[in-house]
Amino acid sequence: MTRPRLQLPPHGLFDWAAGEAPARRKGNIEVIGVPSDFGNAYVSGARLGPAAIRASSLGLPQPAAGGIDRGDVEVFDDADWAQIIERVRAAVVDTAEAGALPLVLGGDHAVSYAAVAALDQAGPLDIVWFDAHTDFCPLTDTGWHNHKQVLRRIAGLGHVGRMLVIGHRGLTYFDETQQWANLDVIGGGPLPESWLRSERPLYVSVDIDSLDPCIAPGTGHPVPGGLGLPALCDMLRTLARERRVMGADVMEVNPLLDHGEMTSLAAATALAALLDGMAARSPAAHRTFEGA
Amino acid sequence: MERAPGHVVNVRDAPPWRGRRLVALPDLLLEAHDGGYAIVVNAASGARLKVSSGLYRILSSFRLPRTLEEAVEEAGDPRIAAGVDALLGRGLLMDADRPMPMAQPLRRAVPYRFCNAPRWAAPAAGDGFVVLGVPYDLGGPGHCRDAPMLIRQRSLDYAYLLDLDTHRPRGWFDAASGERILKGVPIADAEDVHVVYGEKQADTFARMETAMRHALGERSVPLVLGGDRSLCFVMARRLAMRQPLTVLQFAPDTTMAHGEGEVVTVRDVGRRMAALEGIVSCLTLGLRADAGAAVEAGEITVAAARARGLAETVHGAMMAKDVLLAVDVGVLDTSMPPEGNGFSLSEMRDLIDAVGRRHRIAGIGIFGLDAGGMTGGAVAGELLGIVACHLALYAMHGASCAWQGGP
């Protein structure tokens, strides 16, 4: 299989090395950026999220786990949205087949579909979805890949097991009734005990609007009353320590709506917490990136 | 001095303006001029007028208030007098000592409508909400005049949609209850009351009251987007004409100060409303702990409300069936982590729900949103705009429960 072509960023996430994956990749972390916001029909700007998160991460201490930043999936303004999804899926498949762990930087939340779809060999795969919205809307008047119904699409993937939405709140004109037997929805922590005691692999997706807009104003649909950053970091750290995380993403950071990099810094901080948890679960595998 | 357009003057009569001081309108600009004509623009109204060069010369003589004899050497020339009369008739000249009363429009257009609901067209016969912005903030120190626009702008994230089959409003999904609220409830936006900064407060209030009278049907519930909470006075005065009314204010500091003079302020609006005819009671909920000894009768602090229980606090107050619900968004604690000295959004939701269960919410006011970033910065302003949308929709849900048979 030909490796998908990725565009190198000026610097890697957390100042990790940026470039082609080395020969030995098993167990390591690979960052894939997706500068696309075609899945958000109302608010553009999340396409600038990967660059903003990388820039903000440079000001943070190095997390306990290391990795390599493989760059951004190519996105063209006139590209078919389905092709972007396909390129993301191919990049994640390449990472997963090599035994590495994908860390996807969005982009709008519809991108997560590609990442989860690519992990079909890992299944059954549980999903923890930090989000102010359920993203489970039965939309009929928009594109198939839309960030408001991405979890509904993910639920239809054969290898997806249980799903947990954390941070759901507020009002919306969409239909967000709980509509799936395998979907649990909670407003905030603590993490349900049953979600910490499982051997199933886990995918963690963080929509930055799960945070309170006081902390993360730079997102398309902020909702008041959200999670605090310490609470989010604590849950991410715990999940990564207790569960076998196969992949993760951070989505919907919109620098055009941000104030002083508050949101991109919160996103980078959340990622660092996740990586610390992963390193605590398997220190040897994640402490350094061999060959980088 | 008032003449119908096209009025013909007999120059042999002594014109009524003879001997009076005249002046050109202060808002005139010369847009173009050639040998024969000049184009004059009224910058206040946008109107353009074409006048002859002769008339323009006469007009230019009245840059300062003066009589015709002071302004023009050939004052006795009947053609000059006819010219002056024409300029008066076209509204380019006016009597300097008897300024024309400025007819102020009642309302003014806004760039966004609340939740993109339909523009108000006529008073509705049935139940429904009418949104009215009032960008007035001279009743207190806060900068709240931009709040109606900010709230409307943020409300576009909560679009008012119609069901394609029934053509009835679809309402909104409420995550806290897991249900749709305001389903089938019509909303119309009647734009902003026209506010002239510098005019007497009584004039602004009279215009607001007239706008409410025009826009509201018999069963309509107004949602007023302030502005500062002194506007609550107008709402109370208007709504108390329908039914005996209790005013329930959520405010972070006193509204029961003793007022001086005629101007209603944010600090004495509660006391002034309590004195209005038709007001049964006036309660202020949500004073901060540092209000201390300043807490007056009818005022309850956040801590006291929590200690007693939020629903019990609301239900324990003496109230009429109809309630005017006025929320100064300063009552909320939106900090993260919460500082705890204001109500959280979820507490406010519970309080509003408690009111809606026992009472008929006859009017809703959202006040005190500092949208200019003078207190708290742009992030706080934007966040409060979203919070205000939530509060308004929760309160509208509470009000609609009376129409739909309970929450």
Image (tube, rainbow, N blue to C red):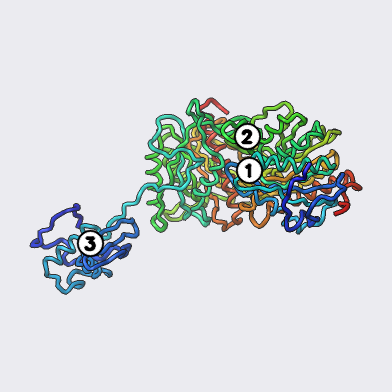
Q: Which residue is mark 1?
A: A223
Q: Residue B43: in sight, yes or no?
A: yes
Q: Nearer the viewer, residue B256 or B20?
A: B20
- Image-quadrant location for residue A160: top right
Are the two marked residues, 3 and 1, in contact with CB atoms closer than 8 angstroms?
no
- Dot 3 lies on which element? strand
Look at 51% across and 29% down and name the residue there: B163
Using the numbered discs, state the Cα–Cα distance from disc 3 to disc 2 in whole angstroms.
63 Å
Per the rendering, the mark at residue A144 is: 2
Q: Nearer the viewer, residue A235 or A98?
A: A98
Residue B382 screen position, x and y as percent: 58, 50
Q: Residue furthest front?
A: A2
Placement of B63 over or under B169, stated as above or below? below
Classify residue A251 as left or right of residue B316: right
Are the two marked residues, 1 and 2, in contact with CB atoms closer than 8 angstroms?
no
Placement of B138 over or under B182, stated as above or below? below
Subunit that carries the residue with mark 1: A
Q: Residue furthest right?
A: A284
Classify residue B161 as left or right of residue A240: left
Q: Which residue is mark 3?
A: B51
